[in-house]
Image (spheres, coloured by chain):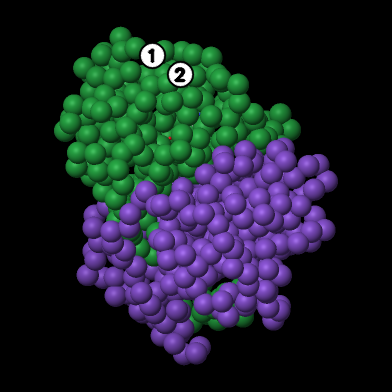
Chain colours: A green, B purple
């Protein structure tokens, strides 16, 4: 069995969000970059658990410039077998999905895992697009994934509850919390990652269908209005009469 | 040219986030001087669907096939793409809810349409088709131009208040081929009687400050008095004090209620990422230095175990 895990590079969750170049570029000054948490903690770790249970091969793919290599090495250190970097910088979901789909079409995977979303772009788009481009079934926002031979049983989140789905491989699944427990790479993994194959290839031709025009920060809050602890009724009055939310 | 809006339903009731998408799509149609229709898949009462006219559509396409009662992203995509072709739709609008997340990207790829998810503004047509969306988990916004001929927009729930007009729509049965679903639904569990967190306008949330699951009556009583939905911080869900679907934040659900009341939650940046789109934030924390106060509109520095029951009483007194 062959599994592909889609890995993206995102700023650390505590990174200060600021923009440069007239609010058209994310300011990378002082920012630490990480493997997108959904990709690492849930998609990749669940794939590694399946590898341990079934002997599957785990491939990683990232669409990005040379600056994404530390990220992909980190993912290899956790236990991926082989990585692919498609050398393109794009923020358009369709373009990225087309690259991943082209690799997948060439390699042939039984399972493709993505994260639920990237924590910078919050697109939640690439998994579904890859599935459509490959004409595969897609299960989104999976919180649990069990495999029995060729049949996957997947628990996924829906409004105010959960649903259990069943599907025959191959399938594309977007992953969230619940799929697996986060792991920390060990020294052996880090050493091994240095020599694992990382193939860099040039992108296939694909259209870019969106472009980011500018960024902005939300308006600053006016400041908190504190209400004395011995007068909670005043809070309720303010919510009713001033904020008009209750 | 027209606008087509996908409206998902559960047991014949169109979701609130889908109504918001319908209203959004109808406004886009006005901006583009064209018409808007909605499409509803699976069993639903046509008389009920006619009321979708309330939100600006003149026509509702209904595909009543029972095989569509369960959502399969691939089968839904096929049907929606067929409807888009029939209607010559060049803008497709989805709610950015769970179904929307599964289907909108597939439809976008099928139609080779640029996709913006989590839209929080109508398109600005002056410089193309520019839609504002949340990025960095609500810590910033991006204005994104969709440059392709066909466009797909998935609208952030709880962002556009509904303004029912009292008009009705014409309901038309739409006949098309339906591919067999590859994904089978074995089981579904939905907590009934509560507004789902993703659609809730009032939310009461608890953190580690509440000490243990045995104290959640505090949160639940206030939520009940308000008619609110309950939520929690991540460690609370991780510890099994509360179900995972209540977890809000960077790695949980991102919500945008009118009112978010945070009880015994410190306000870590990853927590704020999921709730900072709330219109009004109330923080109750015994530590005046808790970072959450910086993001709050109203706050009480005090012991939740003393303060919250009094708030609940005051809410009851108001009604
Ligand atoms: C990558 C990453 C992703 C994360 N994603 C999320 C996420 O999605 N959601 C999330 O919530 N967290 C997330 N976290 C965790 C986050 O950093 C915090 O650890 C977490 O939010 C803290 O939860 P808490 O506020 O409930 O607990 P604590 O930080 O322990 O805060 C408890 C608060 O309760 C107050 N308190 C104590 N007793 C009382 C009392 N009697 N009355 C009133 N107040 C009291 C304390 O003063 C304190 O402020 C993430 C972390 C990382 C690294
Ligand atoms: N540049 C990229 N390279 C590889 N995979 C990606 C890339 N961007 C996003 N993904 C994958 O697609 C998922 C959803 O991303 P998005 O649609 O951008 O929110 C991520 O969690 C990743 O698994």
Q: Nearer the viewer, residue A22 or B298?
A: A22
Q: Which residue was labeled with disc 1?
A: A198
Secondary structure under tag 2 reads strand
Specify the subunit that label 1 lies on.
A
Where residue B62 appears, as percent x and y from the top left, is 57, 67
Q: Residue furthest top?
A: A195
| Among the 4 quarters of the image, the one containing residue B245 | bottom left
Q: Which residue is mark 2?
A: A85
Query: Left or right of A124: which side holds A173?
Result: left
Marks 2 and 1, the one that precedes in the sequence: 2
Q: Is residue A75 left or right of residue A228?
A: left
Question: Are the residues tagged 2 and 1 within 8 Å (C-beta)?
Answer: yes
At x 73% / y 55%, what residue is drawn? B2
Disc 2 residue crowd, few under 14, some 14–19, many 20+, Cα 10 Å? many
In the rendering, at what x and y percent does residue B263 appear? Answer: 39, 65
User: For this view, does A153 lie left or right of residue B245?
Assistant: left
Residue nearest the viewer, comparing A232 with B281: B281
For the image shown, how many numbered marks are present on the structure?
A: 2
Mark 1 crowd level (few <14, some 14–19, many ≥20, 10 Å Cα): many
Residue B242: x and y in percent read: 28, 62
Q: Residue at x 55, y 19 (%)?
A: A203
Q: Quadrant of residue B108?
A: top right
Q: Vertically, is A88 above or below B276?
A: above
Quadrant for residue B127, please give it.
top right
Rendered residue at 24%/55% (across/down): B239
**Residue at the spot 75% in from the left edge and 59% down from the top edge:** B29
Q: Real-space Cα distance between discs 2 and 1?
A: 7 Å
Query: Residue B118, how many percent across, how many down?
Result: 58, 51
Some atom of ligand 2 lies within 8 Å of the CB belonging to the residue at label 2: no
């Amino acid at each position: 069995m062959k599994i592909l895990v889609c890995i993206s590079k995102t700023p650390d969750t505590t990174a200060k969000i600021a923009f440069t170049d007239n609010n058209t570029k994310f300011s990378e000054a002082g920012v630490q970059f990480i493997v997108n948490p959904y990709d690492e903690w849930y998609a990749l770790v669940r794939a590694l658990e399946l590898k341990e249970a079934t002997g599957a091969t785990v491939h990683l793919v990232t669409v990005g410039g040379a600056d994404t290599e530390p990220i992909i090495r980190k993912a290899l250190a956790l236990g991926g077998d082989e990585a692919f970097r498609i050398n393109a910088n794009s923020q358009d979901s369709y373009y990225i999905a087309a690259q991943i789909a082209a690799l997948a079409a060439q390699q042939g995977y039984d399972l493709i895992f993505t994260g639920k979303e990237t924590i910078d772009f919050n697109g939640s788009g690439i998994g579904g697009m890859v599935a459509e481009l490959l004409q595969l079934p897609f299960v989104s926002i999976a919180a649990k994934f069990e495999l029995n031979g060729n049949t996957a049983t997947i628990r996924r989140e829906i409004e105010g509850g959960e649903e259990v789905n069943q599907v025959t491989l191959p399938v594309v699944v977007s992953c969230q919390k619940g799929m697996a427990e986060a792991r920390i790479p060990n020294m052996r993994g880090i050493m091994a990652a240095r020599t694992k194959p990382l193939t860099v290839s040039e992108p296939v031709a694909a259209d870019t269908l969106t472009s980011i025009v500018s960024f902005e920060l939300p308006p600053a809050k006016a400041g908190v209005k504190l209400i004395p602890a011995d007068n909670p009724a005043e809070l309720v009055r303010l919510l009713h009469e001033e904020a008009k939310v209750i | 040219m027209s606008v087509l809006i996908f409206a998902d339903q559960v047991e014949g009731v169109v979701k609130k986030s889908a109504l918001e998408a319908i209203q959004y799509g109808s406004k886009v149609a006005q901006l583009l001087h064209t018409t808007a229709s909605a499409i509803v898949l699976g069993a639903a009462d046509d008389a009920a669907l006619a009321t979708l006219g309330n939100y600006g559509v003149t026509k509702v396409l209904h595909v009543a096939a029972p095989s569509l009662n369960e959502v399969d992203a691939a089968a839904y995509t096929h049907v929606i793409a067929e409807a888009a072709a029939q209607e010559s739709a060049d803008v497709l609008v989805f709610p950015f809810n769970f179904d929307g997340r599964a289907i909108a990207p597939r439809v976008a790829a099928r139609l080779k349409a640029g996709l913006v998810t989590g839209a929080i503004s109508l398109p600005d047509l002056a410089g193309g088709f520019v839609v504002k969306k949340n990025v960095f988990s609500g810590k910033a916004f991006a204005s994104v131009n969709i440059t392709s001929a066909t466009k797909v927009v998935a609208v952030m729930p709880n962002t556009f208040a509904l303004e029912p007009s009292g008009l009705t729509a014409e309901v038309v049965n739409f006949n098309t081929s339906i591919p067999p679903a590859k994904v089978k639904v074995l089981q579904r569990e939905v907590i009934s009687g509560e507004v789902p967190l993703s659609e809730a306008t009032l939310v009461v949330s608890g953190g580690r400050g509440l000490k243990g699951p045995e104290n959640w009556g505090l949160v639940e009583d206030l939520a009940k008095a308000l008619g609110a939905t309950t939520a929690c911080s991540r460690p609370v869900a991780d510890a099994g004090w509360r179900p995972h679907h209540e977890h809000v934040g960077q790695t949980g659900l991102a919500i945008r209620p009118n009112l978010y009341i945070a009880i015994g939650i410190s306000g870590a940046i990853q927590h704020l990422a999921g709730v900072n789109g709330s219109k009004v934030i109330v923080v109750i924390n015994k530590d005046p230095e808790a970072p959450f106060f910086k993001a709050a509109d109203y706050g009480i520095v005090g012991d939740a175990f003393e303060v919250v029951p009094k708030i609940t009483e005051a809410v009851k007194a108001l009604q």
